[in-house]
Image (cartoon, rainbow, N blue to C red):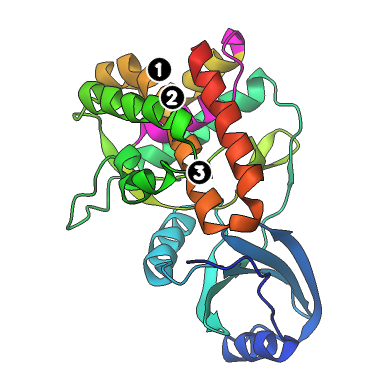
Amino acid sequence: MQTEATPQIRKEDIQHILEKNGLGLLRYLKPISKGVESSTYSLITEKETFVLTLFDADYVDLSNLKEITNHFCGMGFPFAQILATTYIQTRPALLSTHLPGKVKINLDESDYREIGFFLGNFHKCSDFYKPTNQSLPFIWQFSDIFYEIKSNIPNEFHKLEQEIFFLEEKWPHELPKGIIHGDIWPKNILFQEDSISGVLDFNPTYDPYIIDLANILKGIPKDNTPLQESLIRGYELARPLTTVEFESLDLVIYAKMLASILYLLEKSILFPKRRDQFQTYALLNLLKLDLL
C-alpha cells in the first residue's frame, strides 16, 4: 500500500542526477505541487530550469513513459521532454524540460477549438504503438479494487455495480484505439496568449481515442453547447470522428465520470488519512450521475 508521507529529497541526490546528465550545478530547488500520486519540483541550474517528478508508487514504468513521451516531443508536440529517469530513495523519479505558459482560468470557444485541434492532431499521429497484450477497457481496470470499497459505501455500492454492468453491456468494442494522453483537461494545458504552449501530466495508455475527448467534455457544463461544439469542431479539423465514435460520446463521457468516482474511492483506501475527503468527492460525483 502507498504511504501518505511527503517524499523527502536531498540536494546532493539532485546534484548527482544533474551532473550525470551534464545539466549543470543546482542553484535552486522549489516544490511546485504535491499530488495524490506524485510530487513535482522546479530545479534551477546555471544553465536553465528543469522539472523533477517524484512518484509515490513503485510501479511506474518510466522507461516506457520516456520512450513514448520523447517520441511525440520529436514530432513537435508540446509535452515535457524526459531527460533522465532514476530512483531517489527508492522512489521512481524523472527529470524533464520546463514548459512555458500558464493555465487559463476561463476558456472561451476559440480556446476549446485550439484544444480540440491539438488533440485531433495528437491522436492522428498516435497509431504507431501497438501493445503486445491487449488491455481491458479502462473502466474495468478498476476491477481489482472494486469489491474492496463495498464495506466503505454499502448504500451506494449496488448503484455503482449496476452502472458498471450497464457499461459492460453497452460498451462499443469497435472504437478506434491508439496512444491517448490519459489525463487531459484544462488544468493540464498551458497557453501563451492564444496558443497551446505545453501539455502536462502525460500519462499515455493504449485506449479508445475518444476517452481523451470525453474527459474534457465531462468538465464542460451540459447546457454550454457552444463550448462543446467548438471542442469537437477543432478536433475534427485534424481527425474526423467515425460514426461509432460520435454516437458513443455520451456513453464514454458517462464512463469517464464513473471512472473518476472509482478512482476517488480507490484513493480513499490507499490514503486512509484522507478517506473522508476522497469519499465525499466520490459521492458528490455519484449524485451528478443521477442528474444525467
Residue at the spot x=22%, y=55% of the render?
131
In percent of width and height, residue 33 lies at: 72, 59
Q: Is residue 216 left or right of residue 242?
A: right
Q: Residues within 10 Å of mark 3 (few under 14, many from 20)?
A: many
Q: What is the span of residues highlighted in magenta in the rendered image?
A: 209-226
Is residue 66 positioned above or below 21 on the image? above
> For mark 1, what is the residue?
250
Residue at the spot x=50%, y=30% of the render?
117
Numbered badge on residue 265: 3
Q: CA distance from mark 2 to mark 1?
A: 5 Å
Residue 33 within the segment the image draws in magenta = no
Q: Is residue 105 left or right of residue 216?
A: right
Furthest residue toward right: 28
Is residue 88 positioned above or below 37 on the image? below
In percent of width and height, residue 248 lies at: 32, 19
Q: Nearer the viewer, mark 1 or mark 3?
A: 3
Q: Is residue 174 left or right of residue 86?
A: left
Is residue 60 positioned above or below 115 on the image? below
| Amino acid tagged 2 | Ile
| Amino acid tagged 1 | Asp
> For mark 2, what is the residue?
253
Check whether the beta carbons of the residues at disc 2 and disc 1 lie within 8 A of each other: yes
